[in-house]
Image (cartoon, grey):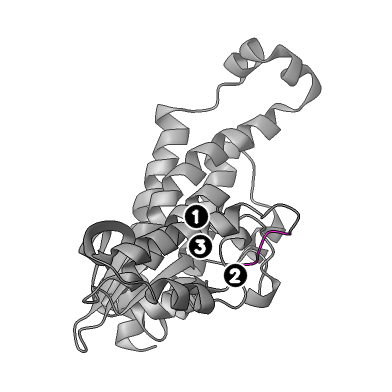
Amino acid sequence: MSGKHDEMKAAIQAVIRTMMDRVMDNVLLKDPFIKEEHRTKRPLYAALVPDEIFKGSHFERRFVTPFGKAWELLAVTAAEKGLGYGTAGYTIRGLVKEERLRRITEVLNRLEHAEKGKKRIKPDWKSELAYVLAGGGEPIPVTVVCDVYAEGKKRGTRYAFELKAPLPNSDQTKVSKEKILKLYSMEPPQVDGAYYALPYNPYGRKEDYAWSFPARWFNMKEDEVVLIGDEFWEKVGGKGTYQSFIDAVNEIGHGYRDRIYREFLGIEPPSSADDARL
């Protein structure tokens, strides 16, 4: 293992541990599942469904919400250890020609609303961007706040990422596409690349990604501005970042799974628990 790999892995583990320790403290001490309270509030549910099912959903709600922000923290950590600099919620200001702004709105409207008697058009990043950039007019000040911003200290490269959960909704994706089009339309350029990114692919390979909502706005399998899983981690942190992420999660995952079985569910971990690896 290289020193850089170990350093990246340790930094990623620190972020995950902080989040998981907070979740465990919440579900065990601050907001535990109380069987009697559940049965009082939902007597019909309790009569039909085992308490353990709702105990699991209690944990899930307190895990999924904080992990939404954890993806950004992990991306910033990867950028800092890889490219050299990263930050979340970064504001980018620039000038965009008036007709380009109008064309961005037109592109989004065409993707959202089908013309009468016609099927809704499919997204095509290259042709859409070419059409937008052909617009002229007076420069208009524009502000874009990106989810994650990263800079390569050696080469001075600047990247902006719209980082969403692996199964994003349509409205989120529309907003992200508008931001990315505006970033590519700025003159002079304020970034060297802007991307719509998902931290992992629940479908496995990129060509198998099948969640329909973002597909209304991007060709998720072919658009060059779409980064899923390893593509994203390698871009934000450099070569080897995705493997560092995988190794980091697998190393500490076993301990947390065992704690959840024993301390939260009150049962011994099954023999199959070790199968749950990335």
The label nearer to you, 3 versus 1, is 3
Would you say 53 lies left or right of 224 here?
right
Q: Which type of secondary structure does the marked residue at label 3 adopt? A: helix
Residue occupying the far front of the picture: 137
Question: Separation of disc 3 and disc 2 at Cα?
Answer: 17 Å
| Residue drawn at x 23%, y 60% as measured from the top left | 140
Reply above or below: 212 against 37: below
Q: Which disc is residue 220 wearing? A: 2
Q: Amino acid at mark 3?
A: Val
Q: Which type of secondary structure does the marked residue at label 2 adopt? A: loop
> Which of the image's four quarters has the N terminus?
bottom left
Q: Amino acid at mark 2?
A: Met
Front one among 274 and 166: 166
Report the span colored magenta: 119-123
Residues at circles 3 and 2 in contact by the CB criterion of under 8 Å:
no
Residue occupying the far right of the picture: 48
Reply above or below: 68 against 241: above
Residue identified by numbered label 3: 107
Rate crowding at label 3 as few (under 14), some (14 to 19) or many (20 or more) other CA atoms within 10 Å: some
Residue identified by numbered label 1: 174
| Residue 221 on the magenta segment | no
| Residue drawn at x 73%, y 59% as measured from the top left | 119
Q: Which type of secondary structure does the marked residue at label 1 adopt? A: helix
Q: Earlier in the sequence, mark 3 or mark 2?
A: 3
Q: Earlier in the sequence, mark 1 or mark 2?
A: 1
The label nearer to you, 3 versus 2, is 3
Q: Quadrant of residue 96?
A: bottom left
| Residue drawn at x 25%, y 82% as measured from the top left | 157
Q: Position of residue 210 (x, y in %)?
A: 69, 64
